[in-house]
Amino acid sequence: MAAICGIDWADQWHDVRIADEAGAALAQRRFCHDEDGIGALIALLGEHDVALAAIERPDGLLVGRLLAAGIRVLAIHPNQVKAARDRFRAAAGKSDEFDSFVLCELARTDAHRLPALAPSGDETTALRALVRTREDLVNARVALANQLRAQLDCFWPGARRIFADPDSPIGLAFLERYPSPTDARGLGPKRLTAFLARNAYSGRKTPDELLERLRNAPVAVIGELETDARRATVLGLVCALRPIVYQISQLTSQIAGAVRAHPDGPIFLSLFRDPKSVITAAGLLAEIGDNRHRYPTRDSLAADAGMAPVAIESGKRRSAVFRWACDKRLRNHLATLADSTRHWHPWARDVYQRARTRGCDHPHAIRILGRAWTRILWRCWHDRRAYNINHHRAATRHLQQEG
């Protein structure tokens, strides 16, 4: 009979427990997180004919090695493991070895309740790496840009106002050349015109209008030493932001090419009208994946995306609350889809407006529309065909009623 194992993973080592179908322990060992240790772990699982492994994460190097070895993997959420510990202990003790035992028992007794990992193809995992890296860089850019705005507000508000975004390429170029009011004392229309030409400024404001923004801002009264310190701070933030902004641009181009070349790309791209929404389409594809077994029903997709509420019933009391446990990245992408389509899609606009009329606030209405979109997206995804408004019965009925 096939054996079952639980793996409590860590950065430096992994605790592994192997048991038979009756729960009797076959092995309990710790392996270092290096090539020799991972190889020995996989070899041990092969010796005991392990067919199912439980672990507390859905991805990573170890999970990839388990899947490559042909082992079915259950990715159990840490909250589920935490709730299950009390089933196997009388006191509040905890250890890595004990957690591997809990994972092994959950895989042995509750495997039919826990979905196995459905890995995506190489094209999808590559796209996921690009999209998630870009999201992380965008978060870093936002954090640094907020620090830059705070510094400019303290000693030079005009430099923040002259362009729409101080962290844009033209804004960073300006701050690199003029990092303080002292550096911009001799800045006039001719110099600004030459600067804009060198940096390929594409805005609609004239040099005189930009200078007016710069000079009409309030003036800070600070000491010379503080001015020098804040000037150095601005230059440091600009140097940190420049490569991030460039890499975000490069990743955006790579993502656009990757999603258009992906076999499922047309499905997700068909949901958007604006070509700039290619990033959101790529994010949806990266998070949902290309393995149709991952979401066997449309409700499972809505729940994982955080678009479906959690029902609480007790006696005569019934309520629906916000779903916190979900794929946060997928929820953000679906919310972006819902928010963008409510402006141009007649059916989506109607669903959103009816939700607002019932008293829902904007985030709640977006989730209602997002859940409606998950039904359509799930059907298009499973049928492997692009979205067509003429085949969308609810949309066509709405158009007929309007017309």
Image (spheres, helix red, strand yellow):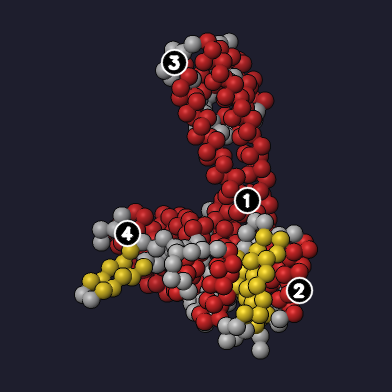
How many numbered markers are drawn?
Answer: 4
Q: Quadrant of the C terminus?
A: bottom left
Residue, disc 3: 220
**Are there few (<14), some (14-19), or many (20+) residues within 10 Å of tag 4?**
some
Query: Is 323 on the left-hand or right-hand side of 88?
Result: left
State the residue at coordinates (65%, 72%): 28
Label 3 element class: loop
Instruction: Give the foreground label among 4 and 2.
Output: 2
Q: Are marks 4 and 1 in contact (CB under 8 Å)?
A: no
Circles 2, 3 touching at the beta carbon (< 8 Å):
no
Q: Nearer the N terminus, badge 4 or badge 2?
A: 2
At numbered mark 1, what does the secondary structure look like: helix, strand or loop?
A: helix
Q: Nearer the viewer, mark 2 or mark 1?
A: 2
For residue 369, say whether it is visible: no
Tell me which amino acid carries mark 4. Answer: Gln
Residue on which the image places disc 4: 353
Instruction: Point out residue 128 in the picture as x, y percentages from the top left corner.
Output: 63, 59
* Whole-number angstrom distance, CA of label 4 to CA of label 2: 58 Å
Disc number placed over residue 43 in the picture, else none: 2
Q: Amino acid at mark 2?
A: Ala
The image shows residue 115 at horizontal and vertical percentages of 54, 76
Task: For marks 3 and 4, give the CA distance.
Answer: 46 Å
Which residue corresponds to the image point at 49% horizontal and 20% vertical from the top-left? 156
Per the image, the residue denoted by label 1 is 133
Quarter of the figure with residue 184: top right
Q: Residues within 10 Å of mark 3 (few under 14, many from 20)?
A: few
Do residues under tags 2 and 1 come within 8 Å of each other at their CB atoms? no
Question: For the residues marked 4 and 1, what is the alpha-carbon distance in whole angstroms?
Answer: 35 Å
Image coordinates of residue 306 in percent, x first then y, are 44, 63
126, above or below 71, in the image: above
Mark 4 or mark 1: whose residue is earlier in sequence:
1
Question: Badge 1 local density, few (<14 within 10 Å), some, or many (20+)?
Answer: some
